[in-house]
Image (spheres, grey):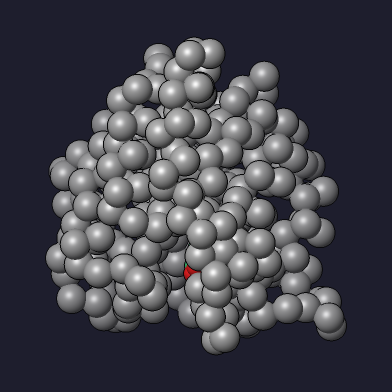
């Protein structure tokens, strides 16, 4: 059985980060180890604020124990990280727990809609760019692609302009760059990816849903991590992850008691499991 380590916060309410990654990756038949970086009452997009218990001081001790027991991971997937110090701890984890054929997947999880999330600044973004350069796969959205390539954000980039930015990111060190939120015409939304190793482009678009919901990036990243860990090729992995997000949004839109802060991915898990049939 495969084992993934995911490093991100636990927002007690909010359907993001660990409350999304743990159930999704587990449901994909993969042991999911977690390194919680902080405990928040709820994620940072709630208007009435949040509590934030920084767990940075606990991380070294946890990692020291894991080293004693010689734990190995088939993939390490990082999401929202609370501070520059935590980015440097992840860099250490990448070195200390490196293993043959292991995948290092980094979702920069620091910005959307043209701006950085609350609490992050330019220095954080620079450090995140250096973490991305040491990953095998990164999953930025368009805002993050702009920040990571020092390009002023716009909504009207042409596909060629976006492709040039993805190549630039790859030249900075990441073999596989998968951009989320790529559009195809008016009705399609999905991913555009560049693989440097064979200079190839991979795209997959699903139905563009009417509403925006928080947390879809984490649902996508968790599912993609699971698919790659289960041995999916790039085209299969992006298809499964995009369709899972689309189905999660459909279930949310159909729920008259839906909440604004996350998607009903739980109700899309049966479809996810049926899609796994196309994997070995
Ligand atoms: O979904 C990314 C995310 C994860 N964790 C926390 C967040 C966010 C996005 O806002 O606030 C705490």
Provide residue 61's location: percent of width, then percent of height: 45, 31
On the rendered structure, is 31 left or right of 73?
A: right
On the rendered structure, is 192 left or right of 242?
A: left
Q: Nearer the viewer, residue 158 or 81?
A: 81
Q: Nearer the viewer, residue 145 or 247?
A: 145
Please name the residue shown 81% across and 59% down the image.
Answer: 267
Q: How many marks?
A: 0
Provide residue 246's location: percent of width, then percent of height: 65, 64
Please name the residue shown 61% across and 23% down the image.
Answer: 2
Screen quadrant of the N terminus = top right
Please name the residue shown 61% across and 69% down the image.
Answer: 42
Quarter assignment of residue 119: bottom left
On the rendered structure, is 98 left or right of 221?
A: left
Quarter assignment of residue 83: bottom left
Instruction: Say if residue 241 shows up in the picture.
Output: no
Figure check: 171 above or below 186: above
Quarter assignment of residue 11: bottom right
Provide residue 261's location: percent of width, then percent of height: 64, 75
Q: Nearer the viewer, residue 38 or 73?
A: 38
Figure check: 269 above or below 151: above
Figure check: 98 above or below 90: above
The residue at the far bottom in this view is 47
Please name the residue shown 20% across and 67% down the image.
Answer: 122
Figure check: 5 above or below 224: above
Screen quadrant of the C terminus = top right
Instruction: Say if residue 254 shows up in the picture.
Output: yes
């Amino acid at each position: 059985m495969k084992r993934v380590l995911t490093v991100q916060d636990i927002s007690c309410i909010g359907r993001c980060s660990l409350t999304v990654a743990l159930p999704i990756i587990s449901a994909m038949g993969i042991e999911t180890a977690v390194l919680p970086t902080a405990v928040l009452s709820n994620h940072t997009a709630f208007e009435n604020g949040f509590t934030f218990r920084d767990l940075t001081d606990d991380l070294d001790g946890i990692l020291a124990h894991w080293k004693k027991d010689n734990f190995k991971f088939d993939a390490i997937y990082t999401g929202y990280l609370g501070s520059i110090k935590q980015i440097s701890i992840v860099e250490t984890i990448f070195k200390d727990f490196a293993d043959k054929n292991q995948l290092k997947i980094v979702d920069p999880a620091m910005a959307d809609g043209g701006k950085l999330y609350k609490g992050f600044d330019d220095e954080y973004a620079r450090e995140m760019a250096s973490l991305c350069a040491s990953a095998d796969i990164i999953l930025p959205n368009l805002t993050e692609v702009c920040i990571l390539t020092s390009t002023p954000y716009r909504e009207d980039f042409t596909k060629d302009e976006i492709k040039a930015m993805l190549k630039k990111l790859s030249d900075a060190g990441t073999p596989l760059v998968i951009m989320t939120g790529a559009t195809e015409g008016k009705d399609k939304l999905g991913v555009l990816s560049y693989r440097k190793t064979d200079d190839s482009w991979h795209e997959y678009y699903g139905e563009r849903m009417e509403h925006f919901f928080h947390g879809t990036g984490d649902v996508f990243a968790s599912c993609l991590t699971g698919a790659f860990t289960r041995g999916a090729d790039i085209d299969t992995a992006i298809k499964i992850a995009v369709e899972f997000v689309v189905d999660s949004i459909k279930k949310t839109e159909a729920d008259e008691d839906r909440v604004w802060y996350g998607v009903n991915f739980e109700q899309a898990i049966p479809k996810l499991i049926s899609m796994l049939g196309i994997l070995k």
